């Protein structure tokens, strides 16, 4: 039952926008069976609106005080939408709470199907979910531990077929893969490929990282021996990527204010074999640009949090409640966007105070809703210190493209 309680906790955090599905599941060391947890969270969210309707109609949370709304979601999902049901002993109190209402719960599901004129559970999934675009599985080769050639050979020995990179990546079938056409350390596989238990992943030789997340380190172009700062570093994949491109030389200061996320960074970069990273628990906004330890820093990797509004393949759209009134949804979304924009502006403006800003800075920012210009333009125009800025803007480029 602890598994279901943990799943409910993840759903609660998602509803409060405290992370992404991927981050809260795959980045949590307490989640032992990540594949199973990821599937339960995603499938529960797919049927969330139906489940909420059933929970409201049956008043099960009022009748069973031990059931929280999110715990009811995951338990009723498995009861109604899986063949195995709830795979815990009947003696477990929380299972009893749900199981004794089984007949009523199933009857309500049948009523919903009749009302919507469908016969299969899959037909209850909203059009929003059905229209979601799922990107391929991207695999970054960790050059700290292996080479592209060795990874290709390993996959080939397992029965995978290396193909020429197709124009439409949706044509990549199971057990086939190709090299990415833009980044030389990236492989592309079928979206259904699951590598979480693969020996190369477990050993840190490959890293499961979206293509958009792989661009900042390449754009930064810090050479071997350089000193660099990753201003918004956790959970660490971009930091470890920068470390790999620098061939474990020089030094990288990795800032993050969230201690839990920084612990994740330490774990992931350690697994990746990074030896040139100094994690700093604190905000980059509070760092003193004139601190002697940063005297030789010439490169800044700045990838502040974004709204994700341009990420059409992102599964976290499942978290949004379509039943909320449009005004409430717009109001809450606008408040979130305002908070993000204020944070982004403050981080970029603080970066401009640094003496080393004449080098490179990468900004991957979201486009303001209902506007035609990116937020970073505002920050640049407001800056009173143009100096010798050489800033590479890669404005949502990879995240706005369907197959990236």
Image (tube, rainbow, N blue to C red):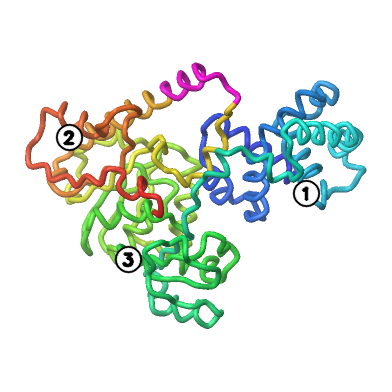
> What mark, if any, has residue 384 been given in the picture?
none
> What mark, if any, has residue 181 been given in the picture?
3
Q: Residue furthest front?
A: 117
Residue 255 in view in this figure? yes
Region of the chain picked out in magenta, as a range: 323-335
Residue where numbered disc 2 is placed: 353
**Disc 2 versus disc 3: distance between alpha carbons?**
36 Å
> Does residue 91 appear left or right of residue 190 in this picture?
right
**Disc 2 versus disc 1: distance between alpha carbons?**
56 Å
Residue where numbered disc 1 is placed: 82
> Does residue 313 appear left or right of residue 104 in this picture?
left
Residue 370 in percent (x, y) is at 33, 27
In percent of the image, x 30 and y 51: which residue is there?
216
Report the quarter where the N terminus lies: top right
Residue 145 location, quadrant: bottom left
Q: Are marks 2 and 3 in contact (CB under 8 Å)?
A: no
Residue 332 within the segment the image draws in magenta:
yes
Report the quarter where the C terminus lies: bottom left
Of badges 2 and 1, the one in the foreground is: 1
- Decide which of tag 2 and tag 3 comes sooner along the chain: 3
Residue 140 within the segment the image draws in magenta:
no
Mark 3 residue element: loop
């Amino acid at each position: 039952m602890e598994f279901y309680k943990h799943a409910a906790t993840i759903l609660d955090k998602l509803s409060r926008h405290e992370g992404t599905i991927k981050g809260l599941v795959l980045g949590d060391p307490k989640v032992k069976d990540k594949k199973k947890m990821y599937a339960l969270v995603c499938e529960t969210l797919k049927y969330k609106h139906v489940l909420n309707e059933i929970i409201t109609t049956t008043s099960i949370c009022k009748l069973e005080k031990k059931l929280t709304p999110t715990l009811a979601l995951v338990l009723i999902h498995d009861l109604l939408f899986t063949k195995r049901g709830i795979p815990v002993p009947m003696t477990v109190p929380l299972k009893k709470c749900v199981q004794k209402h089984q007949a009523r719960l199933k009857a309500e599901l049948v009523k919903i199907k009749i009302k919507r004129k469908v016969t299969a559970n899959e037909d209850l999934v909203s059009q929003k979910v059905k229209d979601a675009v799922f990107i391929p599985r991207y695999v970054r080769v960790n050059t700290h531990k292996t080479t592209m050639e060795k990874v290709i050979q390993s996959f080939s020995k397992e029965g995978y077929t290396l193909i020429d990179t197709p124009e439409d990546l949706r044509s990549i079938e199971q057990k086939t893969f190709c090299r990415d056409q833009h980044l030389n350390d990236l492989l592309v596989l079928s979206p259904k490929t699951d590598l979480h238990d693969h020996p190369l992943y477990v050993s840190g030789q490959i890293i499961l990282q979206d293509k958009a997340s792989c661009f900042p380190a390449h754009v930064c172009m810090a050479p071997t021996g350089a000193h660099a700062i990753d201003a918004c570093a956790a959970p660490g994949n971009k930091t470890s990527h920068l470390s790999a491109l620098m061939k474990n030389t020089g030094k990288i200061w990795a800032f993050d204010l969230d201690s839990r996320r920084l612990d994740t960074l330490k774990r992931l970069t350690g697994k990746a074999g990074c030896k040139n990273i100094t994690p700093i628990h604190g905000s980059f906004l509070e760092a003193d640009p004139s601190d002697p330890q940063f005297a030789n820093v010439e490169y800044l990797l700045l990838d502040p949090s974004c709204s994700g509004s341009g990420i059409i393949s992102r599964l976290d759209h499942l978290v949004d409640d379509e039943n909320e009134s449009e005004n409430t949804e717009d109001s809450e979304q606008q408040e979130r966007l305002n908070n993000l924009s204020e944070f982004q502006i403050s981080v970029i403006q603080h970066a401009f105070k640094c003496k080393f800003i004449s080098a490179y800075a990468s900004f991957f920012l979201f486009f303001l809703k209902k506007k035609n210009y990116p937020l970073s333009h505002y920050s640049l125009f407001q800056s009173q210190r143009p100096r010798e800025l050489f800033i590479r803007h890669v404005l949502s480029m990879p995240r706005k493209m369907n197959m990236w």
